[in-house]
Image (cartoon, coloured by chain):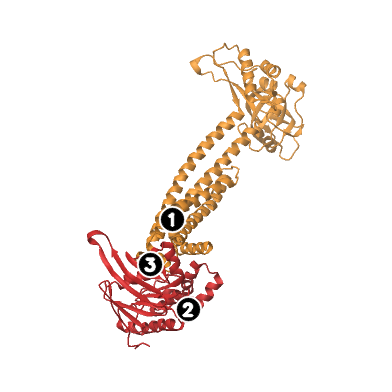
Chain colours: A red, B orange
Amino acid sequence: MTEPLIQLQGITKTFGEGPTAFQALKGVDLAIDAGAFLAVMGASGSGKSTTMNILGCLDVPSGGSYRFRGVHVEQLDRDQRAYLRRRYLGFVFQGFNLLARTTALENVELPLLYRGEHRKARREAAMAALEQVGLDRWADHTPAELSGGQQQRVAIARAIVTQPDVLLADEPTGNLDSERSVEIMKLLQRLNAELGITVLMVTHEPDMAAFAKTIVHFKDGLVERTEIPAGMGA
Amino acid sequence: MLFTTLLLSLREIRRHLLRSFLTTLGIIIGVAAVITMVTLGNGVSASVQASISSLGNNTLTVFPSGGRRGGGNAPPQFENGDIQAIRQQVSGVSAVAPQASASALAVRNAQNWNASVTGTSNDYFDAQNLEFAGGRRFTDAEQSAGKSVCVIGDTIRANLFANEDPVGERFRLGTVSCEVVGVLKKRDNAGFSDPNSTVVLPLKTVQRRFVGNQNVLAIQVAVAKGYDTATVKQSLTGLLRERRHIAPGQPDNFDIFDSAEFASTVQNQMAQMTTFVAAIAAVSLLVGGIGIMNIMLVSVTERTREIGIRLAIGALGKEVLLQFLVEAIALSCLGGLVGVVLAFFASWGFASYAKLPFTFDLSINLISFGISALIGIVFGFFPARRAAALNPIDALRHE
C-alpha cells in the first residue's frame, strides 16, 4: 500500500504554559489520500480549526508527527514551511481575505508573484483560474465591487492558480447565504473531481459537509468518528 | 521581484498621499535646509574670496595703530621715505603703493558724483590688479610736480561722461580742476574700497591739495609671486619697527592687514556657521526618520491581516521584510528628492535676492539624498522586521 498524501500521528497542540495551558489537540491520528474531499466537523473548541492550521503549515504541532508526501513537516523551519505552502497548498478563508483596493486579477496573481513567475505567465495563469471560477469578466474589479459569493470565488481562484495538491478551506461558506454556499460547494466539488485537487474543508453546516466524500467529526481535541455521507450533494 | 515590490510600495504611498506627505515633511525640511545652507555658505565664501582677490592676490596693507591705548600720543603717520625704504630693503615685494585718501564731489556740467579720492603712485594699479580701459598711467614728471591729473573708475566715467571719451577732458574735483589721463575697466565684486567710484591722483597732489599734510595713511605692499607672505610680513615688520624707533619688547604701533589671512578667517567663520546650521538641520532629519518609523509601525499594525494573507500564500518572512523596507526607503527617498528640488529653488532664490553667486554643489545634494535613503533603511528596518516575524495564523486572525 502506498503512503497517504497526508498522515497525522498522535498530533498534540497546547496553547499557553503552566496552569493556564490549554490542550487543544490530544493526539489526533488522521490519514488523507490524494484526491480526497474531506469535510471536518465539530463543535467550537473541538480542535478542528487547530488541526486545519497544522495541516496548512500555518501552525506547528506541540507533539506527534505530520508527514506530507512523506516529509516530516514538524521538522521544517519557518521558511521551508512557507515554500511548502507556496508549492503544494492553497487556502480559502471564511472572511475571503482578499487584498483591498486591489483588482481580482492582481489578487489571483499574488501567489505567482512570490513564485517569481514572469508577468505574462502570471497574467495567463490568473485569467485561466478566474475562468475556472466563472469570473473572467470581473478581472478588473476590486473586492469592494464584488458580492460575497464572487469574492469567495476570487479567493478560490487565488488558491488554485498555483495548481496546488491540496486546497484548505476554513468555513468557506460561513459568510454566504445558502444559494451562494451551494455554488461554492459545487465549485469545490468540480475542482476535486476534474483537477484532482485534494480538498480539506472545515464547516459546521451538515448541508455543506454532505458535498464531501468523507466527513471527519472532531470532539474534545480528538477524532471522534469518520463517516461517508449519503452523497446527497453529488 | 524587487521591481514588483517597489511598484507595490509606490502604490501604497499613493493610496495614503496626505499621510505620506506629512510623514516625509521632516525629511523634506531637513534635506532642504542642509542643502540650502551649504549652498548659500559656499556662495558667501565665493563672494568674500572674490572681493579679497580684487584687492590683488596676497597684499599686505600697513596702517598706523589706532593709538587709543593708554591715552598716549597717536602713533606717527608714515612718511614718503618709508615707501622708498620698503621698496629697497624688503625682498619679495612687487609693488609698494602709498595711500592718502579723501573724498570730494566730482562735478562736470550738470552731473556730479561723490567720489573717493586716492593719492598714490603707479604701483597702486599693480597692487590692486587694476586694468586700463583707455588712457595711461601717471608720468614721473606729473608725480614729482604733484600735477592735477587723474585716473577715474568706471562709475565716475559713467556718471560724468556718459558716452563721451573722458581722456583729455577736465572736471572739477572738490576745489581742484583735474585732467583725466586714464580710465579703468569696470571691476566686479568691488569689495571694501570700490575702485569703480574712485578718482586716483598722484600722492603729492592729494597731500598738497586735498588733505594738506605729508602723511601717508596706509601703505599697500604686493607680495611677488613665489615669495612667502609670512616671510615678507616679518621683514616688513622688522623694517618698520626700526624706522619708527620702537624698542625691543615694545608693541608695534602699526598694523599689517594680510588679505590672504583675512580671507581664510572669513572662510573659517563661514564654515563654522554652515556646520552649525547643518547640525540643526540634521536634527530635523532625525525627527523625520522617527516620524517614518512611527508611521511604518502604524502601517504594520493596520495591515497585519494583509501580512497574514501574504504569509499564508507562501511569502517568506524576508519577502515581507523587503516589502516594508522598500516602502520605508521609497518614502524617505521621495522626501529627499522633494527636499533636493525645494533646496534648489530656495537657494537659487536667496542667492539672487542677496546677489550672491549660486553654485550647484553636487556632493552636498548627493550626501543629503544618501542620508535620507539611509534614514529609510535604519528607521524602516524595525517595523519591517516586526511585520516579517509575525506568526501567519496570528496575523490572519487579527481584526
> Which residue is rendered at x = 47% and y = 53% of the image?
B377
Amino acid marked by disc 3 = Leu
Circle 1 is placed at which residue position? B23
Amino acid marked by disc 1 = Thr
| Mark 2: secondary structure | helix
Q: Where is residue B228 in the image (x, y as percent from the top left)?
A: 65, 25
Using residue B326 as the reference point, say whether residue A59 is left or right of it. Answer: left
The residue sitting at the left extreme is: A19
The front one of A89 and B1 is: A89
Give me the chain letter of mark 2: A
- Give the label on residue A130, or none: 2
Circle 3 is placed at which residue position? A58
Amino acid marked by disc 2 = Leu
**Where the C terminus of chain A falls, by quadrant?**
bottom left
The front one of A206 and A218 is: A218
Q: Position of residue B21 (x, y in %)?
A: 46, 57
Q: How crowded is mark 1: few (under 14 residues within 10 Å), some or many (20 or more)?
A: many
